[in-house]
Amino acid sequence: QVQLVESGGGSVQPGGSLRLSCAASGSIFIIYSMAWYRQAPGKQRELVAVINRSGRTNYGDSVKGRFTISRDNAKNTVYLQMNSLKPEDTAIYYCTQGSPPDYWGQGTQVTVSS
């Protein structure tokens, strides 16, 4: 049974930073692409960032240059470093495994507000 558990969400002021983590279990982590999606109230879910098993990354246009996805295969964990946060980054952030995603975490809330 694959489990993805996100952590690190919270509230931050505009311009601040947060680091999300996603711990995976129940699969051979190293062979899968991992990604972060987000969904804001009243909006469609969107891809934030993806990292494949070789470490190649890709980002949504709205977060390029501000967010960085990385993975630690020894810890079965993927991270999302979010800098220069904006109010429009407010959303529930989901960790996924597979491309396209086969498994989703439960989500973690990120709120950017002054």
Image (cartoon, rainbow, N blue to C red):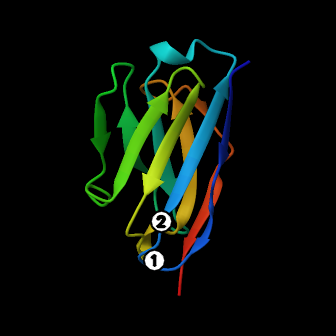
On the rendered structure, is 94 left or right of 88?
Answer: right
Mark toward the start of the polypeptide (1 vs 2):
2
Q: Secondary structure at mark 1?
A: helix
How would you rate the neighbour count of disc 1 (Cα within 10 Å): few for under 14, some for 14-19, many for 20 or more? some
On the rendered structure, is 43 left or right of 23?
Answer: left
Q: Position of residue 37 (x, y in %)?
A: 48, 47
Seen at 46% across and 72% down, the residue is 16
Q: Pointer 2: what residue?
A: 17
Q: Quadrant of the N terminus?
A: top right
Q: Report the amino acid beneath label 2.
A: Ser
Give the vertical position of 76 relative to 20 (above or below).
Answer: above
Q: Position of residue 77 (x, y in %)?
A: 57, 31
Q: Report the amino acid beneath label 1.
A: Pro
Seen at 40% across and 42% down, the residue is 69
Q: Pointer 1: what residue?
A: 87
Give the vertical position of 88 relative to 33 (above or below).
Answer: below
- Name the residue nearer the viewer: 66 or 106: 66
